[in-house]
Image: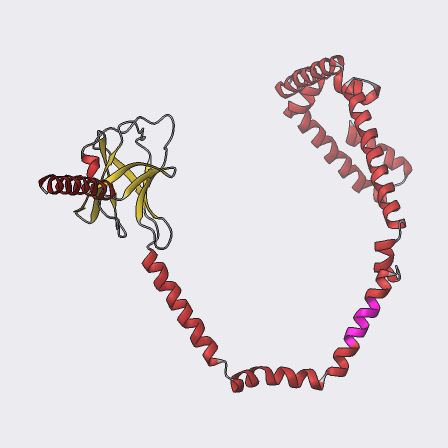
Amino acid sequence: MKNSLETNLGYFAVLVVVAAFLIMETLGGMESIHGGYRLNALFDTVQDLKVGSSVKMAGVEIGRVEKIALAGNKVRVTMKLHSSVVVKTDSKAVIKFAGLMGQNFVAIDFGTPDAPRAVGGTVLVTEEQPDLNAIMTKLDGATTGIQNLTKSFTPDTINNLMGPLVDFVKQNSGHISGAISNVESISGQIASGQGTVGKLIYQDSLYASALATVTNLQDSVAEVRQVVSGVSAGRGTIGRLVTDETLYNETTASMTNLNQILQKVNQGQGTVGKLVNDQEFYKNVKLSLQKLDKMADGLEDQGPLSVIGIMANNLF
């Protein structure tokens, strides 16, 4: 009897230890025994996230949620991760849910390869997921609106909406049928290649003309390219004018000489310069013109001999 009682007590103790282990493992209590390091994340809302919820990276569990507490207008989530897990400082933490009935968990991405490794106490950048309850509320509101809309479509309402359209169709059934027949006839003519549109679609003459035009244009472009190449190579009159440096040098020398001549004329040098700049010459020319004008006035009433004498007197 004594051995049986001790045996039963031993079995009971083993069951209690196994049950406690399973409960602690399920709730994340065993994480305090395992080694690791802690990271933090600040969220606007944790959406039913609980202590002991999983922390995953690419779907693989890398730790557990150790603590959830308010921090000002945010919620601080402390996560204990396995020591072998590498999390980058620019890795992002997001609260996700595994299906509609699944438990929420924290998902952490890999971050960039060049970023440094996050050490214990680092606060990760977070992203907020849409609240499932808010989404369901909006869906419920949309469903209610659709139901109310369908309820408003009574037979009388449908008759009021569709009645004028039905009457219009009945009154113009002949015209509508004629229009449909005309459309069928026109489409048949186009399909058979009749009319301008049909010919444009089915006949090859337009295609041939367009092809010939494109070919001629290509030939013209090729000829222009040959001319440009010849000019660039210095062939022909234009090519020589463009590429021959002798013409450029002669033109430059001519412009230099012309500039020198104009400078001398402007300075009063030479015959032309004196004619342009000498005021005495200008006065003499003006006086001679005045004498000619006076002589012309006196010739109007004189005879030939008198004209000769007047001209001699006025000129000398």
Image position, residue 310 (x, y; %) = 82, 34
Q: Magenta includes 181?
A: yes
Which residue is at 21% across, 47% downward?
75
Q: Nearer the viewer, residue 240 or 280?
A: 240
Q: Nearer the viewer, residue 213 or 301?
A: 213
| Lateral position of residue 160 relative to residue 219, left or right | left
Quadrant showing the N terminus: top left
- The stretch of residues the image draws in magenta is 179-186
Image position, residue 153 (x, y; %) = 50, 80
| Depicted 106 relative to depicted 47: above or below | above
| Depicted 45 relative to depicted 212: above or below | below
Which residue is at 84% across, 29% downward?
223
Q: Magenta includes 267?
A: no
Quadrant showing the C terminus: top right
| Depicted 227 relative to depicted 130: above or below | above
Please tell me in which quadrant of the rendered image residue 278 appears: top right
| Lateral position of residue 137 relative to residue 159, left or right | left
Which residue is at 74% across, 34% downward?
289
Helix, strand or loop: magenta stretch: helix
Image position, residue 256 (x, y; %) = 67, 15
Please tell me in which quadrant of the rendered image residue 42 appears: top left
- Residue lying farthest to the front in this orientation: 1
Image position, residue 159 (x, y; %) = 57, 85
Which residue is at 64% across, 83% downward?
166
Q: Nearer the viewer, residue 258 or 15?
A: 15
- Residue lying farthest to the left in this orientation: 2
